[in-house]
Image (cartoon, rainbow, N blue to C red):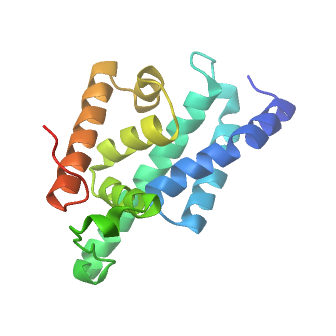
Amino acid sequence: MIDEKKFEEYYLTYANKIYGLAFKLLNNHDDALDIVQESFFRAYKNRNNFKGLSKFTTYLYRIAVNLSYDFLRKKYRIKKIENLNYENFSSYSNRSNFEDCIHYDDIVEKIEKEVDNLTEKQKIVFILKTYEGLTYQEIANILKSRIGTVKATYFQSLQKIRENLIKKGVIKNEM
């Protein structure tokens, strides 16, 4: 059981991390703030049910991931229902000229666009591992999955990003 003072410490310590995770998943400041607020609300509301079998951060990440998944599913359904023209969204400029890719920020932006093209599961594993620096075990605990599945999903996401960047001429295939 977590008392109010301890919970406030958790909020001050982890709110920015949860925001970063949600923002990377949702690509929207306001939506990420909503996820942070709802994650801590649910964690607080259910604090008496937290048995301490895992770290509190794992519990909190799990809540944030689930809320983000739910949000993305709902958003996808709304887009599908409205029959939006996906070609109107920011399109990728296929540049093969090395001079255009020399800037680090440009390459990072292209990688982030490729991350957005991953499946939900690949995206969350990639973000938790790469951006949040979590271990495979921590990710497996958050996703309630096996560690081998998490490793395979991370490898698949890296391969998919790499292949797409090669196809678009951002990086060279050195194999």
Q: Is residue 135 at all visible to an observer of this figure?
A: yes
- The mark total stands at 0
Asked where in the image residue 51 lies, by quadrant, the reply is top right
At x 46%, y 24%, the residue is: 135
Quadrant into which the N terminus falls: top right
At x 27%, y 72%, the residue is: 92
Q: Nearer the viewer, residue 18 or 68?
A: 18
Q: Where is residue 57 in the image (x, y as percent from the top left)?
A: 61, 30
Q: In this view, does 25 lie to the left or right of 99?
A: right
Asked where in the image residue 129 lies, by quadrant, the reply is top left
Q: In this view, does 46 lie to the left or right of 70?
A: right
57 in relation to 8, above or below? above
At x 37%, y 61%, the residue is: 102
Q: Position of residue 158 (x, y in %)?
A: 27, 40
Farthest residue, direction front: 99
Q: Which of 68 and 112 is in front in this view?
A: 112
